[in-house]
Amino acid sequence: MTWGPIVIEGAAHDLSHLDPFVMQTQAPERPKRNVLVSFGCHCFARDPVADDAAELLIQDGKRQRCFCPTRYGQSRGLEAIIRAAPGKVVFFTQQKQNMVLTASIDDLPGPYAIFFDASLSTAKNIDVHMFVASAYEKPNLVRSMPAIAFNTLIDIIAEGRTPKRPPKLTTVW
């Protein structure tokens, strides 16, 4: 899904930086893998609260979200962070399929958490689909979680296997 521009309170906000893209990864001594990366609206919107202006509300399927200028601004660096993920570790969350990649952003006291799912792709020339469901500053993110190398995660999924959660914890931030 391409996002294009959206108009919020009369101002246009370009969301083309959240258009899908393809990148390659390669685990050691394994074939290169093509990964299609796409983004959900939680990367630039938050849960609404009672006093949010109607002009800020965005329909996301059956749910409403609220445009968030902070998340929107932070989302402008998402593609670069994800393109830098090969060679880094990602963390298993409590959710069954959900993973998290963390990054540091200037002026944020806590980690910028990028929550994603990765699944075997059925598209031609694409091995894995990585859907970035949400991204935002998460200062209360637990400090240690089970980890796996990003390239290894992608390789396991591309082979149709299920990644195993290691018992050992790795420091997140």
Image (cartoon, helix red, strand yellow):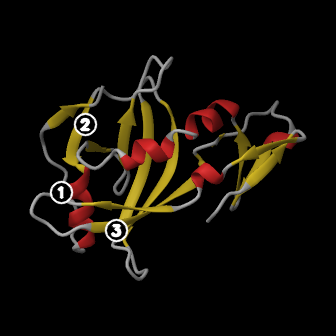
**Dot placed on the residue nearer the N-terminal end, 2 or 1:** 2
Q: Residue at x 88, y 38 (%)?
A: 9
Callout 3 secondary element: strand
Of labels 1 and 3, the one closer to you: 3
Image spot of residue 170 (x, y percent): 19, 34
Side of 146 where 125 appears, left or right: right
Q: Residue at x 58, y 52 (%)?
A: 18
Callout 2 secondary element: strand
Image spot of residue 108 (x, y percent): 49, 20
**Dot placed on the residue nearer the N-terminal end, 1 or 3:** 3
Q: Which residue is mark 2?
A: 145
Q: Residue at x 14, y 66 (%)?
A: 30
- Report how far apart the C-alphas of labels 2 and 1 lie in the structure: 13 Å
**Dot placed on the residue nearer the N-terminal end, 2 or 3:** 3
User: Quick check: 164 above or below 156?
Assistant: above
Side of 66 where 18 appears, left or right: left
**Label 3 crowd bin: few (<14), some (14–19), many (20+), radius 10 Å:** many
Image spot of residue 101 (x, y percent): 36, 42
For badge 2, the amino acid type reads Met
Where is the N terminus found, in terms of image quarters?
bottom right
- Residue 48 circle label: none
For badge 3, the amino acid type reads Asn
Q: Which residue is mark 3?
A: 34
- Report how far apart the C-alphas of labels 1 and 3 lie in the structure: 21 Å
Where is the C terminus found, in terms of image quarters?
top left
- Report which quarter residue 19 is drawn in: bottom right
